[in-house]
Image: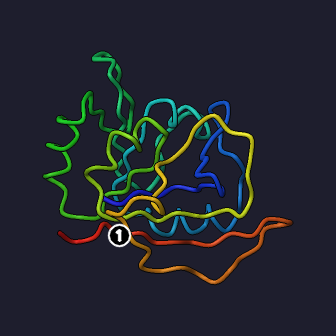
Amino acid sequence: MTIIVAADTNWAIGNKDDLLVRIKEDHKNFKELTTGHTVILGRKTLCTFPGGLPLKNRTNIIMSRDPEYAVEGAKVAHSVDELLEMVKEIDDEVFVIGGGTIYDQLLPYCDKAIVTRIDHAFEADTYFHDLDADEEWEITNTSDEMTSFDLTYHFVTYERKKA
């Protein structure tokens, strides 16, 4: 599985159940990478989408501990074990797209992370694991510096080191 996340200089990813910032090219990159594939996200993240609806042109798997929770147009997994069983059946790339709790739960099962590293420190209450400080991960690709208004950022690919 591959994680996609946007993180600031402190690895912050969100504040008050919302993204830190919206960067048009980041959203475009996200759409290009995930369209036609499977995305895994939490129930709270789904609620932040337009109309609270699953993403179009993707297989959406929503994580929720609520055994009664169901979403039209999406599959629901109620535990990590149930999710991993579902993912075994998928012969395609699977993207973990948030939020914070889902990233924490699924990072051990991911071997790649595509991180939009934003060169700014935002006020935040949700953070991603610092891959730079983790010896299990290494940078395998970094885009050229990009700008959005007064922000600079890079698309950075991390891969789990082979044992």
The secondary element bearing badge 1 is classed as strand
Count of numbered badges drawn on the protein:
1
* Quarter where residue 146 is shown: bottom right
Residue shown at the point (29%, 63%) measured from the top left: 111
Q: Provide residue 122's location: percent of width, then percent of height.
A: 74, 47
Above-or-below relation of 98 to 92: above
Scheme of colours in the image: rainbow
Mark 1 nearby-residue class (10 Å; few <14, some 14–19, many ≥20): some
Which one is nearer the viewer's eye here, 120 or 77?
120
Q: Provide residue 35's location: percent of width, then percent of height.
A: 44, 63
Which one is nearer the viewer's eye here, 14 or 67?
14
Which one is nearer the viewer's eye here, 92 or 129?
129
Q: Provide residue 39's location: percent of width, then percent of height.
A: 38, 51
Which one is nearer the viewer's eye here, 57 or 38?
38
* Quarter where residue 125 is shown: top right
* Quarter where residue 27 is shown: bottom right
Residue type highlighted by circle 1: Glu
Residue shown at the point (41%, 44%) measured from the top left: 103
The residue that label 1 is drawn on is 159
The quadrant of the rendering that contains the N terminus is bottom left
Residue lying at the far right in this picture: please name it.
Answer: 150
The quadrant of the rendering that contains the C terminus is bottom left
Describe residue 119's horizontal placement relative to residue 84 as left or right: right
Residue shown at the point (43%, 35%) measured from the top left: 101
Q: Provide residue 161's location: percent of width, then percent of height.
A: 28, 70
Residue shown at the point (73%, 52%) measured from the top left: 121
